[in-house]
Amino acid sequence: MLTYEPDETVAHRLDPRSKLAFQIGFAATALAHTSPRALVALTAVAGLVLAATRVPPLETLYAYRFALVILAIAPLVAAATLGPPWIDVERGVASGRASYRVFLILLVSAAYVRSTPVRHSRAAIQRTIPGKPGQILGVGVALVFRFLPVLQGDLKTIREAMAARLGTERNAVERIHLVGVLALTRAFDRADRLSLALQARCFAWNPTLPPLSLSMIDLPVFALALVLALSAFV
């Protein structure tokens, strides 16, 4: 699971609001343009972002392994037809380009997660979106970033325990049933413990958030985000 890692890179020193703006601009232009030239340019940008944040490529690919399987299968499903010619290459290529664009967006989002503390993400959201909607969204983002790795750890523990007890010898349906039931049980238990912990710590909707400040290095990022967002309409 990708998590925040302290470092001294330029991306770590950026304000989270500028990084969120870049995320939005990159996603907008990636979804709007499908030409090979645009994909090459977006690939170069994503590569620069990963290098700037020192994101390990293999670890990132492993973290997204389930999503990558779905993205890889999508073009095959799109290309298949129920009658002659049985395989529509044009549809498969179009779906493959769409999958690749989603893959690039995932890589850029991995760079954001790697370089931004959870509290800073919550502060950026709540200070950008005023009122209760911003508070709810900020809390939701913070809980997802903190809760999802715990659930993934529980799922890994369940699978390892099944393997140690020769659970891999069971048929696929039975394995899926056992893992699903145990995972849901763990998730509900975690949710109950999280609720109790929040009450014990006097959870507040509007806590003291870390200070955020824009600097000169954020200006080029905002400018690039604006260019990317506008390019979606060109």
Image (tube, rainbow, N blue to C red):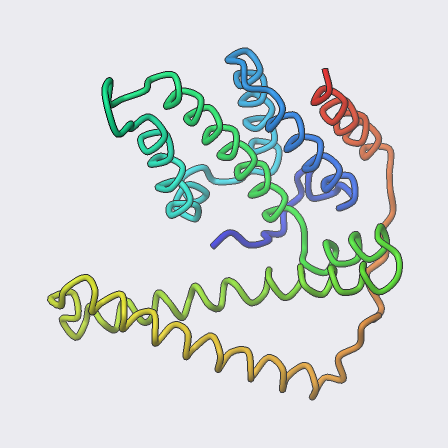
Instruction: State the residue at coordinates (46%, 28%).
Output: 100
Residue 168 image offset from top left, x and y in percent: 16, 65
Residue 45 image offset from top left, x and y in percent: 60, 24
Residue toward you, 141 or 35: 35
Question: Against 180, is 68 above or below?
Answer: above
Q: Hey, which quadrant is residue 203 in on the image?
A: bottom right
Q: Is residue 10 visible?
A: no
Left or right for 110, reference 95? right
Residue positioned most to the top = 37
How many labels sit on residues?
0
Instruction: State the residue at coordinates (79%, 57%).
Output: 123
Residue toward you, 159 or 134: 134
> What is the quadrant of the C terminus in the image?
top right
Instruction: State the residue at coordinates (11%, 66%).
Output: 169
Residue toward you, 51 or 153: 153
Q: Is residue 133 visible?
A: yes
Residue positioned most to the front = 83
Residue 233 image offset from top left, x and y in percent: 73, 20
Question: Against 141, is 150 above or below?
Answer: below
Question: Against 85, is 162 above or below?
Answer: below
Left or right for 90, reference 230? left
Q: Hey, which quadrant is residue 135 in on the image?
A: bottom right
Residue toward you, 93 or 56: 93
Residue 17 image offset from top left, x and y in percent: 79, 44
Left or right for 169, reference 12? left
Instruction: State the residue at coordinates (49%, 28%).
Output: 98
Question: Against 110, is 210 above or below?
Answer: below
